[in-house]
Amino acid sequence: MKTIYINATFFTMDKENRIFSNGMMIVQNRSIIYIGERNEELLADADQVVDLIGKWVMPGLVNTHSHILMTLLRGIGDDMLLKPWLETKIWPIEKQFTSEIASVSAQLGILEMLKSGTTTFSDMFNPNGIDPNVVMETIAETGIRGAFSYSIFSFGTEQEQKMNLIGAEQFSKDYKNFADGRLTTMVAPHSPYACSPEALIESARIAKENDLMIHIHVSETDYEILDIETRYGNRPVEHLRKLGIFDQLTVMAHGVVLNDEERAILKQYDVRVAHNPISNLKLGSGIADVVGLLDAGIKVGIATDSTASNNNLDMFEEVRTAALLQKGIYKDATKFSAQTALTLATRGGAEVIRMGHTGSLEVNKKADFITIYPYNKEHLQPITAAYSHLLYSARGSDVCDVYIDGKTIVKDGKCLSIDEEKVIYESNRLLNNLTTN
Ligand SMILES: CSC[C@H]1O[C@@H](n2cnc3c(O)ncnc32)[C@H](O)[C@@H]1O
Ligand SMILES: [Zn+2]
């Protein structure tokens, strides 16, 4: 089945940053087989023609670090630093989680992601009290693409820690290639402060034996640096390097507090960084030096973190914030162009999480794309310099349609794979079962 999309402007976000106004894209077997100028000969051979009537088409956004199981915690724990936020708010609430709460939270988070243009995500979840198989089935039904990672913590009794590692390994293997290959896993030790050296060594072993990436929170706050230095005599990056974590391909979430030496280590081991600007601001953690990371040759993706520290999952807002912050901290408006920022939110992010088969509109890439209809949007007028509009003016709520694997997942702003009303109703009902103060 060949579906041909016409009458749109295609922002490919490929290496040449090609844009085709009045272009054409052909999708067959879930992949892009043609992207370019309109071609009448090829058009005559279509099984189905979709008229995109003046829309902008771009690759779906890639959120490189999220916690969708925390979506019900939106609005809880404002105005707190990371450590007390985790220890006195988030972790006690997560202890009350059930599979039902986790599934509804996941659906609500994915609904928000999809409707605001995210087609791929990389998530870490706290497995406390839940059956991850139930959650993974729920995620598969939404049609989203991504990596979902069962977190490793060194909390509780020795037996509990052992069970946590066994659960993480089993989950990582069971869902490595799931839902037609749309979903996979990573190995996710929570952080250098919540994992013992032994748990970190085990995490590296699981990743190595199963050819999986590692996803871990690192160098998020000044306190973390002090804490790890005090406990182990090294800063977090050196601590993890010594334990062999970086011998496996790693995505580090945050990387707010890094020095030149650490950037050199990250580059040497090809460690990638998921940059969470809004979460870092809200938790008072600081601002990551993304320009410094990119200049050092480190791969960077953009991410939202959870709705408890953001408080939304809108990647348009996230990438705009990322760009503005870099210009601000460098006092240099030439840093971090719209094109660079949007690349990190699409193709760059996909590469960070080893999903280079998505993230740009190119032949042989997965047909994961979104559309925006600019003509009835005041804030997208006049229609010029569209990269600029996409970064500085567009919002997640501008997204009309979302396609993943060539399948329509959102049509005219309505999600076809999730019962929106039910998820909203259930979210409010289940929140009442949680003690949150
Ligand atoms: C690692 S599983 C997910 C787990 O991590 C906790 N969490 C959420 N946001 C952050 C953050 O910014 N830094 C550290 N830990 C965080 C939360 O308990 C999640 O369920
Ligand atoms: Zn996080």
Image: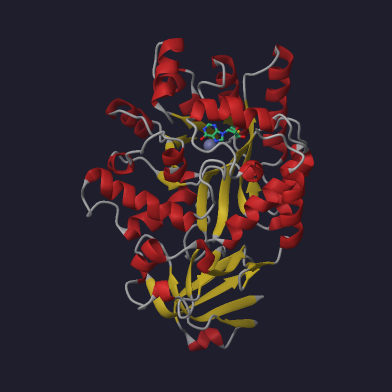
Q: Residue at x 63, y 51 (%)?
A: 109
Q: Percent position (x, y) of residue 190?
A: 56, 28
Foreground pick, 13 / 28: 13
Residue 408 sits in quarter = bottom right
Residue 128 image-quadrant placement: top right
Q: Residue placed at 50% from the left, 22% from the top?
A: 192
Where, quadrant-wise, is the C terminus in this rendering? top right
176 shown above or below 420: above
Residue 182, visible in the rendered structure? no
Above or below for 372 versus 121: below
Identify the residue at image location x=28%, y=29%. Answer: 260
Q: Residue furthest front?
A: 437
Residue 53 image point, x, y percent = 52, 83
Task: Tell whether 363 sits left or right of 270.
Answer: right
Instruction: State left or right for residue 275 relative to residue 424.
Output: left
Residue 254: x and y, percent? 44, 36
Q: Quadrant of the N terminus?
A: bottom right
Rendering coords of residue 57 (x, y %): 48, 71
Residue 232: quadrant of the picture: top left
In the image shown, does 228 or 213 lie closer to the viewer?
228
Picture mark count:
0
